[in-house]
Image (tube, rainbow, N blue to C red):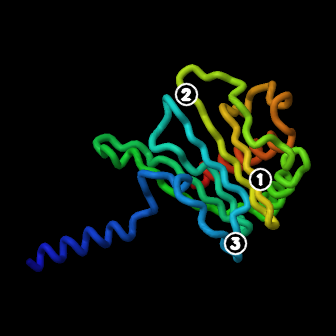
Amino acid sequence: MIKILVAALFVLNIFLTCPAQTRESVCLEQQPAADASDPVVLNICNHTHGMAATPQPRLYFRLHQSGLVEYEVNPGYREGAGDANFVLLKKKIKVRAEDVAEVIRLCEQQDFQGARNEYPAFQIWTDSSLQTTIVFTHNGREKKIVVNNYSETDQRNSSYYPASLIALLKKIEELRKSMLEYN
């Protein structure tokens, strides 16, 4: 009986000390109440349909006023790990105050604030689609924009999207790349 109790405590300890991982994205959860000490200023969730890694949707980028950034990734693939390959790991990293200020500046631009609530897919992809939901919250205001099949490399972006939205998505992509290299 003692061996069973020790084994159960060992398994419980492993469960409690593992990094945050889940089969569902935090994007599916109701947005948490704003933390007055460190509010979320930008939340970006991606939902890929078709040929896509699971699970979907996933938190692409969540920026807090303090510079804390949260995002979700799949763990590295491990042969024989089964379902453990298809969970989401929530990662955290801190960005510079200058980066936070730039993101806020871009989102407060007149063309961003006046942007449509949703942009249709201008590119039709063969076997997948991507829906990106961007929510900017600052000084009691909220702006939500949904972009479908956005591709940073499309030369026609400037004819479809506001300049500040393109600049914001480019900035977020740069920050993500640096975070993934670091983490």
Q: Judge whether 55 appears above or below 139 on screen.
A: above
* Residue for badge 1: 143
Mark 3–mark 2 Cα distance, whole angstroms, equals 36 Å
Residue 155, above or below 136? above
Per the rendering, the mark at residue 128 is: 2
Q: Earlier in the sequence, mark 2 or mark 1?
A: 2
Q: Residue furthest front?
A: 117
Q: Within 10 angstroms of label 3, few (less than 14), some, or many (20 or more) residues?
A: few
Binning the other alpha carbons within 10 Å of mark 2 as few (below 14), some (14 to 19) or many (20 upward) gives: few
Image-quadrant location for residue 11: bottom left
**Element under label 2?**
strand
Amino acid type at circle 1 is Lys
Relative vertical location of residue 137 with respect to residue 133 in this rendering, above or below: below
Q: Give the residue at mark 3.
A: 38
User: Are the two marked residues, 3 and 1, in contact with CB atoms closer than 8 angstroms?
Assistant: no
Q: CA distance from mark 2 to mark 1?
A: 27 Å
User: Which of the two discs, 3 and 1, sits closer to the camera?
Assistant: 1
Counting residues from the N terminus, which is met first, the one under dot 3 or under dot 2? 3
